[in-house]
Amino acid sequence: MSWKLADNPEVCVGGGPVEHKVGETVVWDIHSKQGVHFFQSPSNKAKSINIEVKFSVQEGDLEFKIDRVFD
């Protein structure tokens, strides 16, 4: 995944697997932070999932707010 942090397209932070081959160990970008959210119940009945992510430059932390809409 890549995050665009400014209007300049060259200012970007990426993270995730760097290389993956079936049956082999995944090689990860160790200089990136990542977040994972597990739902307590299946989300396949949700009409939509709204995700808001805030990144603290000073702390280097990610804050997630996730809402599912079941209309």
Image (spheres, rainbow, N blue to C red):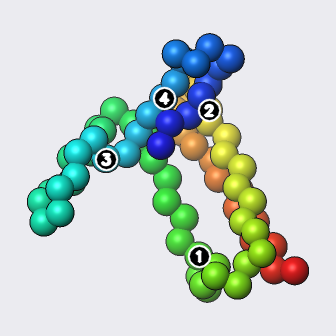
Separation (CA) of disc 1 from disc 3: 22 Å
- The percent position of residue 50, horizontal first and vertical second, equals 75, 60
Q: Which residue lies under the disc numbered 3?
A: 17
- Secondary-structure class at tag 4: strand
Residue 10 vs residue 29: left or right? right
- Secondary-structure class at tag 2: strand
Q: Which quadrant would the C terminus be assigned to in this image?
A: bottom right
Separation (CA) of disc 4 from disc 2: 13 Å
- The percent position of residue 65, horizontal first and vertical second, equals 71, 56
- Secondary-structure class at tag 3: strand
Residue at image location 52% in from the left, 16% down from the top: 10
Q: Which mark is residue 56?
A: 2
Type of amino acid under label 2: Ser
Type of amino acid under label 4: Val
- In this rendering, the answer to whether 63 lies above or below 65 is above
Badge 4: residue crowd in 10 Å (few <14, some 14–19, many ≥20): few
Separation (CA) of disc 1 from disc 4: 26 Å
- Secondary-structure class at tag 1: loop
Residue 49 vs residue 40: left or right? right
Q: Are marks 1 and 3 in contact (CB under 8 Å)?
A: no
Separation (CA) of disc 3 from disc 4: 13 Å
Q: Which residue lies under the disc numbered 4?
A: 13
Type of amino acid under label 3: Pro
Please tell me whether mark 1 or mark 4 is closer to you in this view: 4
Badge 3: residue crowd in 10 Å (few <14, some 14–19, many ≥20): few
Separation (CA) of disc 2 from disc 3: 23 Å
Please tell me whether mark 4 or mark 2 is closer to you in this view: 4
Badge 1: residue crowd in 10 Å (few <14, some 14–19, many ≥20): few
Q: Which residue lies under the disc numbered 1?
A: 39
Type of amino acid under label 1: Phe
Reading the chain from its start, which is encountered first: label 1 or label 3?
3
